[in-house]
Amino acid sequence: MFNRIMSSLGIQGIQVDTRLHNSHVQAGQNLLGEVLFRGGSSNKNINGIYLQLMTTAEVESNDSEHNTALNIAQWHISGAFELQTNQSHNFPFSIQLPFETPITEIQCRQNKSRVWLHTHLDVDWGLDATDKDFLQISPTPTQQAFIQAMQQCGYQLATVDTEKGTLRGNNFQSTIGCYQELEFKPQGIFSGINEIEVSFVAEQHQTHVLLEVDRKFRGDGFKSMTIPHNQANLANITHEIKGLLGI
């Protein structure tokens, strides 16, 4: 069932629908699907078909915060062509998600991160046809191991959100215009730490981790670590976290 209908100048327009074959994926994996569309009551020139990976990011401005939709990746899957009256087409696609794509599927008290695929048909002489499909982004094995290691160290994941901007650590920085923050709280332990905010900057073979540690009596401090994916086991990561935190 086509779920987006565009009208142009009072003439029935183009119908477009993006169907995903695997909407539940991890960052760095390929997203498979097809764009289906059908012409209206007259021929239309299509300038191109684009897929845009979008997320909701928090923006700080003038001592206030607001959320905005942010384009973190884009793919051009078709060039210009003429769409004939009532003619149906489909374009299959396989696109690799950025390694830094925010996580959406994670157990915590509050997760504000959202990721979706925006389909855009650039149409001559009218409003462009669009479609919007939400994705379920699971943690990678390395990210999941790190979250479990934090729990082993006595910290529970409380909230997750995505911030607009660039994150910089020792010999790494984010590249997609935003970064995710995972806020951990101490659970059932005597701790001089109020909270720890964790951000992942993932690459193909390793994941960088920046920890912002909010200590009760010494303010904030930053720690970082890099986890090779072939060494991402729970025991090693737990040991390294304990060393960074001095516990």
Image: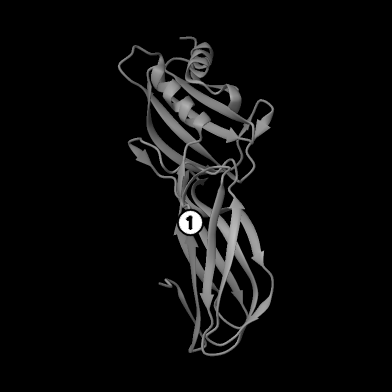
In the rendered image, the vertical position of residue 230 relative to residue 87, given as above or below: above
Is residue 197 visible in the rendered structure shown here?
yes
Image point 61% across, 83% down: which residue?
A: 125
In the rendered image, the vertical position of residue 72 relative to residue 10, given as above or below: above
* Left or right for 188, reference 152: left
Residue furthest top as drawn: 247
- Give coordinates of residue 18: x percent, y percent: 50, 65
Q: Nearer the viewer, residue 180 or 1?
A: 1
Quadrant (top left/top right/bottom left/bottom right) for the C terminus: top left
Q: Nearer the viewer, residue 27 or 214?
A: 27
* Left or right for 184, reference 208: left
Give the quadrant of residue 188: top left
Give the quadrant of residue 225: top right
Image point 35% across, 39% down: which residue?
A: 110
* Left or right for 2, reference 110: right
Quadrant (top left/top right/bottom left/bottom right) for the N terminus: bottom left
Image point 33% across, 13% down: which residue?
A: 189
* Left or right for 96, reference 190: right
Residue that label 1 marks: 21
Q: Could you tell me the amino acid type at mark 1?
A: His
Q: Nearer the viewer, residue 108 or 46?
A: 46
Q: Nearer the viewer, residue 18 or 72?
A: 18
Is residue 228 visible in the rendered structure shown here?
no
